[in-house]
Image (spheres, coloured by chain):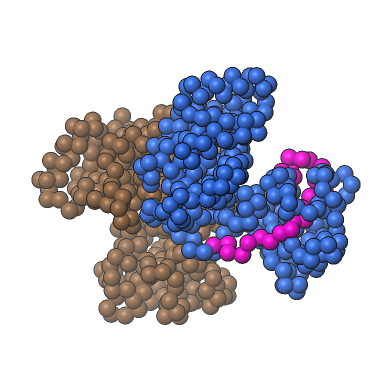
Chain colours: A blue, B brown
Amino acid sequence: VEMQSTQIAGPFLLFLGDSQDSRLTKTAAGVHHWCPEMCKGQLRLDGETVDLGLADITPKKFQERYGSGTLIIGVANVGGIFPNSWIKTLVSALEHGLDIASGMHSRLADISPVSEAAHKYGRQLFDVRFPSGPLVVGTGKKRSGKRLLTVGTDCVVGKMYTALEITREMQARGAKVDFRATGQTGILIAGSGICVDAVVADFISGAAEMISPNNENDHWDIIEGQGSLSHPGYAGVSLGLLHGSQPDALVLCHEPDRKLIAFSESYPVPDIQTTIDKNSLAAKLTNPAAEVVGISLNSKSMERSQANDYIRSLQQLTGLPVVDPVRTGVGAIVDRLLQ
Amino acid sequence: VEMQSTQIAGPFLLFLGDSQDSRLTKTAAGVHHWCPEMCKGQLRLDGETVDLGLADITPKKFQERYGSGTLIIGVANVGGIFPNSWIKTLVSALEHGLDIASGMHSRLADISPVSEAAHKYGRQLFDVRFPSGPLVVGTGKKRSGKRLLTVGTDCVVGKMYTALEITREMQARGAKVDFRATGQTGILIAGSGICVDAVVADFISGAAEMISPNNENDHWDIIEGQGSLSHPGYAGVSLGLLHGSQPDALVLCHEPDRKLIAFSESYPVPDIQTTIDKNSLAAKLTNPAAEVVGISLNSKSMERSQANDYIRSLQQLTGLPVVDPVRTGVGAIVDRLLQ
């Protein structure tokens, strides 16, 4: 099954709107971090806007230098809708030969001037939160090739970051590997994928099956996890993704200082062993060989020595390789995968 | 939060199309079984069509006798789309003062002649598979009142039937109780509800929270379950529904002779104790007091004596009340609920 067959084409111009809050420009920062060679410039609506340190380029200049490419909407807006103040700039990008890609909750295609300009100038609009083709119910049929899924004790604990680091490390070692994106930033980075939290509920595991199809026996799909089995709002998405991914290997992501589940007022973050057991058990439904092969921490709130102690004690407790992708890299986990 | 605030209004005329296959007219049969006093007639396109034993009435006659009401699309069509041969009849129903309610995968509102006629005659179209209002992500906040959810070892094992029987039995005993529908046939029977498998994946548990809001402390919501935690395609829906429902009580539905999970080629039906453990454990995330309070069987494939032996042995094994709603009624489970 072919999905999202049209890849989002580089080079990229990163649109930052007029956001002065770097928490809202994380998508742009993520694309810049993971695809630095693709990002040729930033487009900011005024001088107070967050600065990623890229050249400020207008769509006209971008066209003169690079011919074509894609304007990436790299800024989230509270409420997820496009402000009117952006429209002129978006239309100008289309006029100057750029496609536009967005991970917002509302659609570029629903903004009449933008949709008309795309048609007029023959450009493409990528609303990556919305699946572009027909989906199916998951079948649970065994697929060839190997798969790794990142899971978490919570949302926003580094599941995308860890998956991308593992992919990069495996590529560096010459392994056959693909990153498989399941969220909007991941899709913008990978150029394809399906937002599994945006599909109709019946199709969660079917979408996961679709993004990681049959492959060579020694090929690894590194699948971006979503949510957490212990999140009162998102666990359904996490379970469907887990079943559809049929992972051979799970990597558990965790933020040591987090006390409460994200976006909840009273749910404690579950402990690591409970999370390992819960995910392993659920994963065995569609892949009896599934096992947790490592733990990936976001320990930025800790001093280095404190983080090292924590990593060592967690290794002893679980018998698993424990890493912080930023501090230690993910080599210890990849060692185990490629054994 | 108010959803689907406009109730589907009786009396009902059950539309059976030209189906000669009673497996395809189960929705009509279900509405007839559970709402006999509401169903005043059937509308069949020819003499070979399945006969529910109701009076054959034209929309014109229906209007003369009852003034207004709703035409229920009681027949499923392979592929879930409306054949052209139905359209004239649907338009005639609207012309004669009937609303139309459908649980099909495609929308009444998307058929131009039907949508235009509804507008012209001021009638309503209920596409019950599609949520009618905005949805939210589940919060996991504790709600007042009591809740029961039916869960299953598989799909299509009697979760709706059991929930409706428990509701009816509790009503008969004067308890405060409401059936909460989560699938299309249930919604047509109840007149409101949300198809949880048709919502965007992010909102599964939020939808379950919405259909069973805060209530009096001694009020029971009896929530229709969907899918199974052991189904490779649908477990995400089941887990989101379980978390959002915050059930105090779970009733496990099971078909003793089923060997393989529905719509799968190789997944075995899990055993009862495993299913009890899996559902109880998952339910405790949002309601630590959750417990399985009974087992409901569909034992129609067994001889009566064989079924009785099976029920007795399962009672001994689990220590729970075990019923077959058709053969024994659900009294034993309701006894335990109202203790």
Q: Which residue is drawn at 57% across and 30% down?
A: A323
Q: In this view, does A183 lie to the left or right of A276?
A: right
Residue toward you, B87 or A295: A295
Q: Does the magenta stretch include residue A152?
A: no
Furthest residue toward right: A47
Q: Where is residue A1 in the image (x, y as percent from the top left)?
A: 48, 63
Residue B96 visible, this orientation:
no
Q: Residue at x 23, y 42 (%)?
A: B323
Furthest residue toward front: A174
Q: Is residue A100 left or right of residue B19?
A: right
Q: Where is residue B160 in the image (x, y as percent from the top left)?
A: 34, 50
Q: Image height check: is B27 above or below A142?
A: below
- Tag count: 0
Q: Image height check: is B293 above or below B92?
A: above
Q: Is residue A43 left or right of residue A281?
A: right
Q: Image height check: is A247 above or below B52?
A: above
**Residue A58, quarter of the rendered image:** bottom right
Q: Which residue is drawn at 38% across and 70% down?
A: B77
Q: Does the magenta stretch include residue A21?
A: yes
Q: What stretch is highlighted in magenta?
A: A3-28
Q: Residue at x 37, y 41 (%)?
A: A289
Q: Where is residue B137 in the image (x, y as percent from the top left)?
A: 57, 44
